Image (spheres, rainbow, N blue to C red):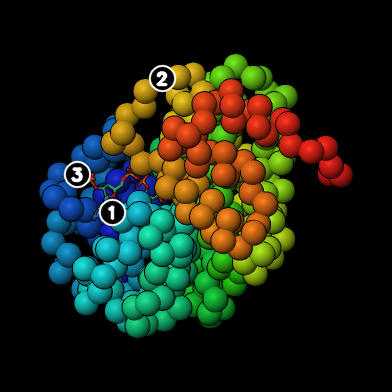
Amino acid sequence: MKIAILGAGAFGAALAVALGREGPVTLWGRGQTSREIARLPGITLPETVSVTAEIADIAPADAILLALPMQALAMFAQAHAANLVDKALVACCKGVDLRSGLGPVEILARLSGPAPAVLTGPSFAADIARGLPTALTLACADEAMGERLQRVLSTPVLRLYRTTDVIGAELGGALKNIMAIASGVVIGAGLGDSARAALMTRGYAEMQRFALAHGAKAETLAGLSGFGDLVLTCTSDLSRNFRFGHALGAGQSFDPTQTVEGAATAKAVAQIAAREQIEMPISCMVAALIDGKVTPSEAMQSLLSRPLKQE
Ligand SMILES: NC(=O)C1=CN([C@@H]2O[C@H](COP(=O)(O)OP(=O)(O)OC[C@H]3O[C@@H](n4cnc5c(N)ncnc54)[C@H](OP(=O)(O)O)[C@@H]3O)[C@@H](O)[C@H]2O)C=CC1
Ligand SMILES: O=C(CO)COP(=O)(O)O
């Protein structure tokens, strides 16, 4: 399978480095002509990676990995549909589209071709690019396609686990970013590690509630794409979602050019939760915080004053 990666940001470039160690890969980025990656400083692309800003150059690829921000995916897929149809598409983004309420695989499934897959799980781009061991979930509804992609995209240090539970894998990756923001708020506001552990645990319950209501399997949420990525991004200040929340909690500003997927996803999830009457107090509070409707201390007060209940 010939591989092309779309998006020369941190994750796309890291995947190109990892897969480029095993064979030729094409990396497309808008306006990307250099082999230096602005969003992944200090990393050099191997010679096996062809860098291009011409979307037509991905034509020979059989498998296309889309490593773009979630909120850009739908427009991108529509604009470049002719280059994507009939390819094995792998969404590498985490989130829920704010306009449609759809996840990345549902968006890509609007194009004709094989069932799209999603690649998600605990993996900082910088770790992948450095060749550190990483395990991810590859979810595809078509089992045979999933097996093929798993084989082609696994390397000795990038270990892919497979599932057909696409919605579970997608929602785990989308929802954990909201919890990473909330964890950042807790730490940034000086509320301590015990409060963060409580937040993560109740956040995980919230992730399960939302995902199960949308047909996901509980064991998928307990895997790499849910619990695994929740732990990583709620506890590491390498996470942009965590750092964004930390800045919110500490009353500091945050670089608006950084990709913080949990921000738009919190709003999308709050809207869906209200419509479908799913209890999502942390997600709704994160959405309200981002919109400036509540302060961090009001958010915390509101969460702590909820009625006492069974765990
Ligand atoms: N970074 C990480 O550690 C990981 C990221 N992910 C996921 O990968 C996805 C991408 O994130 P990441 O690579 O980190 O983000 P970055 O901010 O590093 O890069 C995003 C890239 O997408 C490009 N882009 C943005 N909008 C468009 C558009 N409309 N058309 C074409 N290109 C566009 C940007 O180009 P430009 O620079 O020109 O704006 C940039 O190259 C996210 O969903 C994230 O959750 C998943 C696992 C790990
Ligand atoms: O999803 C990630 C690691 O699995 C990257 O996290 P951030 O987008 O918060 O940096």
Residue at which label 3 appears: 35
Ligand 1 within 8 Å, label 1 CB:
yes
Write the residue at 47% across / 48% down. 267
- Name which of mark 2 and mark 1 comes first in the sequence: 1
Q: Is residue 236 visible?
A: no
Crowding around mark 3 (Cα neighbors within 10 Å: few <14, some 14 to 19, many 20+) is some
Q: Position of residue 4 (x, y in %)?
A: 29, 64
Q: Position of residue 298 (x, y in %)?
A: 59, 26
Crowding around mark 1 (Cα neighbors within 10 Å: few <14, some 14 to 19, many 20+) is many
Which residue appears farthest toward the right when viewing the image? 310
- How far is the residue under mark 1 from the one under mark 3? 13 Å
Q: Amino acid at mark 1?
A: Gly
Write the residue at 45% across / 36% down. 290
Write the residue at 79% across / 38% down. 307
Front residue of this view, candidates 22 and 152: 152
Height in image: 278 above or below 113?
A: above
- How far is the residue under mark 3 from the one under mark 2? 34 Å
- Name which of mark 1 and mark 3 comes first in the sequence: 1
Q: Amino acid at mark 3?
A: Arg
Secondary structure, mark 2, is loop
Residue at which label 1 appears: 7
Height in image: 216 above or below 197?
A: below
Ligand 2 within 8 Å, label 2 CB:
no
